[in-house]
Image: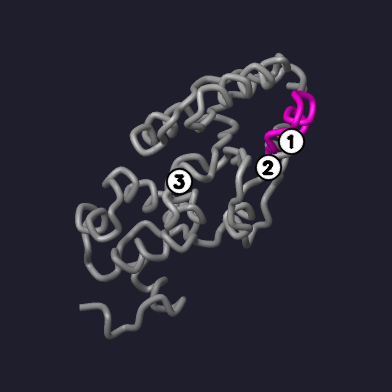
Amino acid sequence: MTKSSRHYRVVIVEPSIIISTGLKYLIELKKEFEVSAIIADYYHYTEKINHLLPDVIIINPSVVDVKKRQHLEEIFTELKETAFIALIYQYIEPEVVKQFHAVIDISDDGERIAQKLLHAIDAVNAPPDAAEKNELSDREKEVLIALARGKINKEIAEMYHISVHTVITHRKNIIRKTGIKSISGLTVYAILNNLISINDVE
């Protein structure tokens, strides 16, 4: 399938109707893009966004709680192949901007926005380095440690204030990355990789 025949789904997370409507208009000038949802408040729609499986999320970083701004992958747990684009028209901390695949400025025109979206999609779909692909995220390491200490999904969810569904997703990712399915095997993996000491295991 050629790039021109591909149809990309875009979700916009932006509280201003004026800005989100204008952005939608500019994006859809290019026929390969379709804005499948405009959401003002991501807090109540995270599950919906995950189920939409967008190719691109354009999000105003200021709508994300300050403590979570550097951890988008923990908010949108199922969107491993989604490009995250920051929509910026006010000051945002450089550390926050770094995690995005691209940045849309309020002054960008439709052509520039389309270029940024396509470059970000290409970057996400580039084949990852094998070591990077198999490296556990910080949250996956936390879940692995909790599993090794005998915690069940519900307890892990309560510990980290996430849903049981999210815990299950992390467990699947851990199994995929490590190739280990049993709790005992994962416990040995955690010990060998210095995530826990042997004294932590009852």
Is 138 drawn above or below residue 73 in the view shown?
Answer: below
> Which one is in front, 151 or 182?
151
The relative height of residue 116 versus residue 187 in the rendered view (above or below) is above
Q: Which residue is mark 1?
A: 116
Local SS, label 3: loop
**What residue does disc 2 label?**
103
Comes first in the chain, label 2 or label 3: 3
Residue 4 position by quadrant: top right
Residue 86: which disc?
none
Rounded to the nearest angstrom, the CA distance separating label 1 from label 3 is: 22 Å
Determine which of the numbered discs, if any, sits on residue 64 in the image. 3
Label 3: how many residues lie within 10 Å, few (<14), some (14-19) or many (20+)?
Answer: some
Q: Position of residue 155 (x, y in %)?
A: 20, 58
Q: Which is more toward the observer, 186 or 58?
A: 58
Answer with mark 1 or mark 2, whichever residue precedes in sequence: 2
In the picture, measured across the screen, residue 160 lies left or right of residue 19, that is left
Verify whether residue 106 appears in magenta: yes
**Real-space Cα distance between discs 2 and 3?**
16 Å
Depth-wise, is mark 1 or mark 2 nearer the camera? 2
What percent of the width, then of the height, locates residue 143?
35, 61
Amino acid beneath label 2 = Val
Q: Is residue 121 magenta?
A: no
Residue at image coords 63%, 24% = 23
Give me the residue at 36% from left, 39% from top: 43
Expressed as whole percent of the image width and height from the top left, the position of residue 162 reads 30, 50
Are the residues tagged 1 and 2 within 8 Å (C-beta)? yes
For label 2, the SS is strand
Which stretch did the figure color magenta? 104-115
Please state which amino acid type lies under the numbered disc 1.
Lys
Hey, what amino acid is under mark 3?
Answer: Val
Q: Where's the N terminus, which quadrant? A: top right
Quarter of the image where the C terminus is located: bottom left
